[in-house]
Image: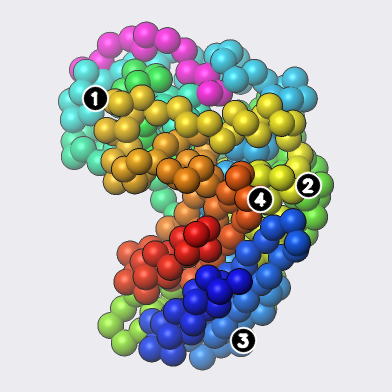
Amino acid sequence: MNALEDLTRTLDRLQGAGELAGWAVGVADADGARPRVGGALSPGGAPMTPATQVALSSCTKPIGGVLALRMVELGALTLDEPVAPWLPELAEPRVLVGPEADLTATVPAERPITLRHLLTMTPGFGWVSEPGPLADALAREQVAPGPFCPPMSPDDFMRRLGSLPLADQPGTAWRYHTSSDVLGVLLSRATGSSVAELLAEHVLQPLGMTDTGYTAHASRLAAPLAPEEGGPRPVELPAGTYVDPPPFASLATGLVSTVPDQLAFLRSLVGGPTVLSPGSLAALRTGTLTDEQRRTAAGFIEPGCDWALTVEVRPGGQVGWAGGLGTIGYADPATGRAAFLATAVTVDSPATITAFDSFWGLFD
């Protein structure tokens, strides 16, 4: 596949120039998987291999979406019933009169928050880019979006989040990330099982994703890096990250995985062995954004793209998402092709931007 070889040459060039320590990429279709790796786990470290684990960051989100739809299929939840019976912290939310308003300037929510709102990132909470009291309070309470699992228990997280007003009426605006944090709490409370247990039983084991989880093999983890003059340097990780099970196993971020595991997951969305019914897969891949939601999603969802149930839908129909620590994975329902790339350098890096741009050639 010429596009894969072109991409590996680009990655080799970036690694040779010192802009990447290492990289891992792969393509899979009905004929099998083709992984490629280069460079090292960290600057001056051991070589990358196909068994290298990478921090998925927000590429965790689509996995959480598949788990949620599987729970719907099993009857644990429905898409459109209120989540309040399991999340009483969100039972009677107040809504700010504007995202920059004082925290006391609120009105009642016009409708209850549902699982569908969480999967479409429209419950009224999430990334708040507007400066003001709400953004300050989210940061102060440590419930603002971030690249790592929240540093508290799920119950404490929900108490803190539920003490604050919503930025928008449920179902009206798209706000990133926090929906997937809350999704994990909902699934755990509704089933009585932990998120890690649910993932293992219903997604990871059925798909053969044996190297995916919240902890990594220390000798196989590609160090998350950030760009600096003179070459990328390790990101400062919260204590225990990827070493110990997190106090809050989020479905927004936090998983580690390998290229083969991610290709298996992505193929499950477009014709490979799957854990979902055809109807659930169709729902997962169907765009949902209104014009107003497209406006509030600007900066996350590119023009011409849509958002479905925890995945972006590209103009060509490919579905998937990217992660802030340098991961991207998409799959094409029309061809059955899946592709995954990890640079292990944050997405603000010119090298990762270049690599991601080249990634799309895999679907030409």
What's the residue at 32%, 71% (across, down)? 350
Confirm or deny contact between disc 1 and disc 3 (CB under 8 A). no
Q: In the figure, residue 229 lies in which quadrant?
A: bottom left
Mark 1–mark 3 Cα distance, whole angstroms, equals 51 Å
The disc labelled 1 sits on which kind of residue?
A: Leu
| Quadrant of res 274 | top right
* Residue found 47% across the figure and 31% down from its top: 287
Nearest to the eye among marks 1 and 2: give it: 2
Name the amino acid, label 2: Pro
Label drawn at residue 103: 1
Q: Secondary structure at mark 1?
A: loop
Q: Which residue is mark 2?
A: 273
Disc 3 is placed on an element classified as loop
Give the alpha-carbon distance from disc 4 to disc 2, as whole Å.
11 Å
Local crowd size for mark 3, using a 10 Å CA cut-off: few (<14), some (14–19), many (≥20):
some
* Segment colored magenta: 102-116
Task: Examine the rendered structure and indicate whether residue 100 appears above or below residue 8.
Answer: above
How far separated are the C-alphas under marks 3 and 2? 31 Å
Q: Nearer the viewer, residue 56 or 182?
A: 56
**Marker disc for residue 47:** 3
| Residue underneath mark 4 | 336
Q: Quadrant of residue 355?
A: bottom left
The nearer-to-camera label among 3 and 2 is 2
On screen, residue 102 versus residue 332, left or right, reads left
Q: Position of residue 35 (x, y in %)?
A: 66, 72
